[in-house]
Image (cartoon, grey):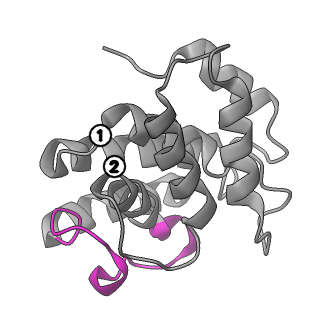
Amino acid sequence: MKIVSPELIKLIADQSFLPNGGYHGLDHWVRVLNNGRKLAKLTGANLKVVELFAFFHDSKRLNEGHDPDHGSRGGQFASAMRGQCFDASHQEMEILMYACEYHSNGLTEGDVTVQTCWDADRLDLGRVGKFPDPKFLCTDAAKQPRLIEQANERAVWRFSRY
């Protein structure tokens, strides 16, 4: 079952300020989705929140550099879309908004769904030339060497094919 519809993805991408192929654009979101789905199977995280996080967490970045409020804006955007483009409970939205707001603050403690969201994003650091360091990952599932290697290969491959 698809939680995030193609129509919702298009709506989010159309309202993003960054190019789809950039470091924080649609290509990144899809890799975060892939990482998140794999992790959620291992962690028991709420898959709906993980999938929504993949597309909203960087959706309101103003630039590819320093933008400390982008996660909060992404969470607020998700809140505005709730009920119109997707359904989520009050608790799911609280978790999603927290995960979005704090995803780039380096935190590692929290609800397993929040941790899974953050790990899904951090496993895609290869796109900016950084290999994911297990000490900055939250869940035991994400710290598995083979999972890290596979996620990094996907992230690096995206830029090495040109």
Judging by the rendered image, the residue that carries numbered circle 1 is 37
Say whether residue 150 is left or right of residue 100: left
Residue drawn at point x = 16 percent, y = 72 percent: 145
Residue 85 in view in this figure: yes
What is the residue that sits farthest to the bottom in this orientation?
Answer: 135
Measured Cα–Cα span from mark 1 to mark 2 = 6 Å
Q: Secondary structure at mark 1?
A: helix
Q: Residues within 10 Å of mark 2 (few under 14, many from 20)?
A: many
Do the CB atoms of the residues marked 1 and 2 lie less than 8 Å apart? yes
| Residue 71 x, y percent position in the rendering | 67, 58
Judging by the rendered image, the residue that carries numbered circle 2 is 35
Which amino acid type is marked by label 1?
Arg
Taking depth in this image into account, of 41 and 149 the one nearest to the observer is 41
Residue drawn at point x = 41 percent, y = 54 percent: 117
Residue drawn at point x = 67 percent, y = 13 percent: 84
Q: Is residue 119 magenta?
A: no
| Residue 2 x, y percent position in the rendering | 38, 17
Write down the quadrant of residue 1 in the picture.
top left
Residue drawn at point x = 30 percent, y = 39 percent: 46
| Residue 95 x, y percent position in the rendering | 47, 48
Q: Residues within 10 Å of mark 1 (few under 14, many from 20)?
A: many
Q: Which residues are magenta?
A: 125-143
Say whether residue 133 is left or right of residue 42: right
Say whether residue 105 is left or right of residue 84: left
Say whether residue 104 is left or right of residue 107: right
Which amino acid type is marked by label 2?
Asn
| Residue 105 x, y percent position in the rendering | 57, 77
